[in-house]
Amino acid sequence: MLKGFKERPIGIFDSGVGGLTVMKEIICQLPKENILYLGDTARVPYGTRSPETVLRYSHENARFLIARGIKILVVACNTSSSVALSSLREKYPLPIIGVVEPGARAAVQMSRQKKIAVIGTETTIKSGSYEKAIKYFEVSAEVSGVSCPLFVPLIEEGWHEGDVVTLTAKKYLSSVTDNGADTLVLGCTHYPMIKNIIEDIVGINLIDSAVETAKEVKQILTEQDMLCEDRVEAFREFFVTDFPEKFIKIGERFLEHRIENISNIQLGN
Amino acid sequence: MLKGFKERPIGIFDSGVGGLTVMKEIICQLPKENILYLGDTARVPYGTRSPETVLRYSHENARFLIARGIKILVVACNTSSSVALSSLREKYPLPIIGVVEPGARAAVQMSRQKKIAVIGTETTIKSGSYEKAIKYFEVSAEVSGVSCPLFVPLIEEGWHEGDVVTLTAKKYLSSVTDNGADTLVLGCTHYPMIKNIIEDIVGINLIDSAVETAKEVKQILTEQDMLCEDRVEAFREFFVTDFPEKFIKIGERFLEHRIENISNIQLGN
């Protein structure tokens, strides 16, 4: 272990603000850790890009954070987690955590019937990435997916409570337990913002990938003796690839903290 | 006039499916015209890009269509119309029509009080492009803008009727007539899809930019003796820069026609 390694920051990237729900949970579980967050807001959303493009963006994001001396990398983006995780792990010699595996593992542990439903963006559901991950942990699991394309724009508009989002959630979720699922995975980093509404409607166990990812980060840092224990005040820094105003406005609701120390950076082209 | 010039197609481009509402009106008013439609779906939305980038994309789109022998170019995209119209007109020797000017002109003609409200995406409203165009036609006009960010995702999700979109519209439009506006411009090519809902809520004159743009296309082709008059069956062809499936699914609702003859093309990078 290098001297000062424990003091190094945790690095998190996402295509936009969604990963801030993961950062919020990491702050909650690891309040003493310094954190660098990169939101590739100029190239959001990743979900509609080709796998090659997402791979390239993910490597650019990873390199940017690794060059700043992070001790662990959190890929807080469903698309990058599905497409780029193994390639990133191959290339960079530090622990790299995605958001899909922790949610999938927790769902398998939680579900009694091994019947699991997943909600996410259209791209995530179509990709089948949660289904693959769940079946990796429990080959006999039955997995159903429902895409909820309006949740992200509703949440980003700040309508994460009230009649419009509730009515929308009821429409999307009416069939989610049809196949007898006893556990529902929130397969999008935005969805924790409307967790209570979803929970009220479906009435089954919810797996919040943001919480599970934060748990995994804590576990790995603990196991590898990389936890920062004696810091008085943690430092958090943000990088975005487009104008920061919208990121700050939406992001502070996600993070439940002020967003200061934010810089506009250039990546790739 | 070159021989066969009248037989040439009309060219339309947009960043995505929105411009199909303009195409629908052009088909309605000019059913004999051949039409080429280019949707730059790989690079949608333009609204969040820098003006330099939108300018570059717009020129690439224009060149693609002009190379296919169009007689008139319709820039059926609010962002391109605001940013790139004069540059396109400078460069290419054919009539070029945007969607902002026709709507602005019609609003000034329609409004008795010269108090005009505009609804659009956040980018369109922030850009002030309708306000500038309206004041160009009537310097004393009072213009207010309301952005309605959820309309586009709701319409693309196919929820252009029912309780969710009605409730959303009521929220956005409750203040639209506060300043005494007697005319409302639909400043987004998606919005004609929910025109009836908007009309019921606001109860003032509505200007549909798609209809006004189609009128202007017809007027210019008539004035310049470029109308195609003796064709039996018109041919329509579509080009998209990303997978066509989603474009077809959403687009057929916008166009109210089948989308056939569609090709996936590459532009720019």
Image: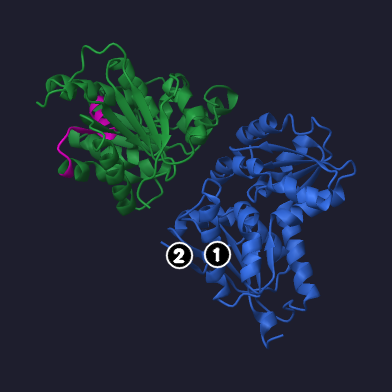
Chain colours: A green, B blue
Which residue is at the far left? A1
Left or right relative to A76: residue B204: right
The image's mark for residue B267 is 2
Q: Chain for mark 2?
A: B
Q: Nearer the viewer, mark 2 or mark 1?
A: 1
Q: Residue A153, how many percent across, how many down?
A: 51, 35
Any magenta on residue A96? yes
Q: Residue A195, how many percent across, how many down?
A: 43, 22
Q: Residue at x 71, y 45 (%)?
A: B195
In the rendered image, the vertical position of residue B22 relative to residue A36, given as above or below = below
Q: What is the magenta range?
A: A91-106
Q: Residue A157, how many percent across, how many down?
A: 55, 31
The residue beneath circle 1 is B59
Res. B16 visible in picture: no
Which residue is at the far right? B112
Reading the chain from its start, which is encountered first: label 2 or label 1? 1
In the rendered image, the vertical position of residue B65 relative to residue A30, given as above or below = below
